[in-house]
Image: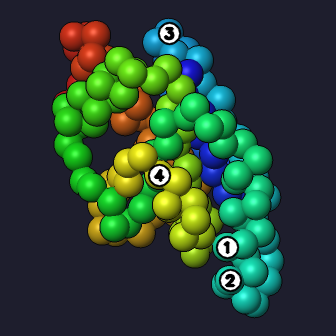
Amino acid sequence: MIKIICIGKIKEKYLKDALDEYKKRISKYSKLEIIELSDFDNNNVNIILQKEKECIEKYIDPKDYIITLEIEGAMLDSKSFANKLENIYNTNSNITFIIGGSYGLHESIKNKSDFKLSFSKLTFPHQLFRVMLLEQIYRAFRIINNETYHK
């Protein structure tokens, strides 16, 4: 099973449509759960990160293999990402991706991570990034199963 824990809710219809399409495609390969948590409005970054941490922790299972999305994480190409997922599935059937809010992730969440992943040194809108992550998960399943997919 793949679980994606993310801060913020998707409001734009075109992004919801893209997410729904990739959820449908991924369902052929794996159960998928997306947990959207509310973002917090506060002038203090530390308070925001603490509140987000508390919300995220409620959805982490000790048996989950945790992949945090961090700008400081390892950058993989699609084939390497597919290999990584396949290797994880050989030892753990629960993969949890965590996408933080505007200020990233609380240090204690980063410390729980089994693998830190970065898609780029660029900063992406969190809503758009969710679509990008699902697309890469779908692409990984296609690669793992030796199925063609556009390049």
Q: Nearer the viewer, residue 31 or 150?
A: 31
The CA distance from mark 3 to mark 2 is: 40 Å
- For disc 1, the neighbor class at 10 Å (few under 14, some 14 to 19, many from 20) is many
Task: Give the structural element (helix, strand or loop) at label 4.
Answer: loop
* Badge number at residue 113: 4
- Residue at image x 55%, y 50%? 98
* Secondary element at image label 2: helix
Report the residue that reaches farthest toward the bottom: 43
Q: Are marks 2 and 4 in contact (CB under 8 Å)?
A: no
- Label 1: which secondary element: helix
In this view, the mark in front (3 or 4): 4
Earlier residue among tags 3 and 1 = 3
The kind of residue on which mark 4 rests is Ser
Q: Which residue is mark 2?
A: 46
The CA distance from mark 1 to mark 2 is 5 Å
Indicate whether 99 appears above or below 19.
below
Q: Give the residue type at disc 3.
A: Lys
Q: Could you say which quadrant of the image residue 80 lies in?
A: top left
Residue receiving disc 3 = 28
Per the rendering, the mark at residue 139 is none
User: Mark 1: which amino acid?
Assistant: Leu
Q: CA distance from mark 3 to mark 1?
A: 35 Å
Residue corresponding to mark 1: 49
Distance from the alpha carbon under mark 2 to that under mark 4 = 20 Å
The answer to whether residue 14 shows anywhere in this view is no
Q: Residue at x 56, y 22 (%)?
A: 1
The C terminus - image quarter: top left
Above or below residue 145? Residue 50 is below
Query: Mark 3 or mark 1: which is in front?
Result: 1
Viewed as shown, does residue 78 lie left or right of 106? left
Earlier residue among tags 4 and 1: 1
